[in-house]
Amino acid sequence: MGKIAVVQHPPVLLDRNSTLEKAVSLTKDAANDGAEVVVFPEAFIPGYPTWIWRLRPGGDMKLTEQLYDQLIKNAVDLSRDDLDPLRDAAKQHGVHILCGIDERDDTMSRSTLYNTYITIDPDGQICNKHRKLMPTNPERMVWGFGDASGLRVYDTPCGRIGVLLCWENYMPLARYALYSQGLEVLVAPTWDCGEGWIGTMQHIAREARCWVVSSGTSMQAADIPEDLIGRDQLFPDNDEWINPGDSVIVEPGGKIVAGPMRQQHGILSADIDPSRVATARRSLDVAGHYSRPDIFKLDVRDGVQTPFSFSPETKKLR
């Protein structure tokens, strides 16, 4: 049995350091309330590029480029010490921290961004990094495509946790790749919201007979920094809810046990009993006795994929 906390707060949009400070403070609040696993939203550091849904493709190119410039300057480079404050917080409070970042590629072009979700263990080490497999619609103008190297589960006090980002949860094969590893808790950080999304979370809890934790971002226009480039054009009404959040925790079988938290900032929590998963799968185990491996087969290429490899010996691309 373990307690999981879902942080539903806005970032300090396009300000990495200030958002990290906020994440550290919120981790402390969650840990002081007994949480052993702390979950942050998709692309929390330094924020989800919500402007992509408001700008005209090809018509607002200058503003798009200016915002992208700020995003890439505040993105997280995992080869540096960018996440040290959050890693220190995990170690100080003895918790797992799961958090979305805009990751700047540190191995190839050094320019491509990824929608990445990282897991930090209680020793302060990054124990998993998952890059979103398929950015949705205009997201493809911001993020590159990820691979399956981070599509795996890992042990926590709340059970075996795996992560799918936003509409990855609509990808049946991605879900099954986690189910087949003994998934007990699916964490679904998302920019989506509303009854349709919540219903999807309940469906997955019924399908996989697992716990489902959906982490949304609540954000009003008033939460966006005054000095953001193009703010007055993009978000003129301070009272507008750009995203209501709708974080929710669902038990195996589909019953909602916490949330949805709508149009408010806060921390949603629940006690997670992983032993309930095995019991719930007695009648339906889609990766076990219900799987029919004599008929169906799933092949997952889980290696790190790169455009090319470089051989120092030959100084040639291969």
Image (cartoon, grey):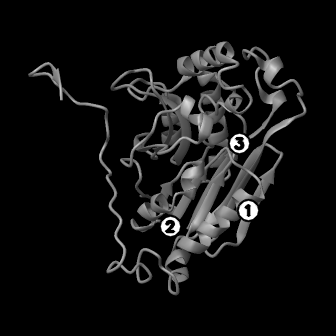
Query: Where is 105 relative to 277, above or below?
Result: above
Q: What is the number of the mark on residue 184?
A: 2
Q: What is the number of the mark on residue 132?
A: none
Whether pointer 1 and pointer 3 mark residues with C-beta atoms closer than 8 Å, the reply is no
Mark 2 crowdedness (10 Å alpha carbons): few <14, some 14-19, many ≥20: many
Q: Which residue is mark 1?
A: 258
Residue sitting nearer the eye, 175 or 86: 175
Query: Where is 95 relative to 185, above or below?
Result: above
Image side of residue 52 versus residue 157, left or right: right
Q: Measuring from the top left, give residue 217's x and y in whole percent.
A: 71, 42
The residue that appears at 41% across and 23% down in the rendered structure is: 80
Residue at the far left in the pictured view? 313
Q: Which residue is mark 3?
A: 217
**Based on the displayed image, in which of its 4 quarters is residue 63 positioned?**
top right
Image quarter (top left, top right, bottom left or bottom right) of the N terminus: bottom right
**Based on the displayed image, in which of its 4 quarters is residue 25 positioned?**
top right
Whether pointer 2 and pointer 3 mark residues with C-beta atoms closer than 8 Å, the reply is no
Residue at the far front in the pictured view? 58
The residue that appears at 50% across and 27% down in the rendered structure is: 76
Q: Measuring from the top left, give residue 305's x and y in whole percent.
A: 32, 40
Image side of residue 183 versus residue 214, left or right: left
Element type at marker 1? strand
Residue at the far bottom in the pictured view? 283
Q: Amino acid at mark 2?
A: Glu
The reply to whether residue 93 is visible in this rendering is no
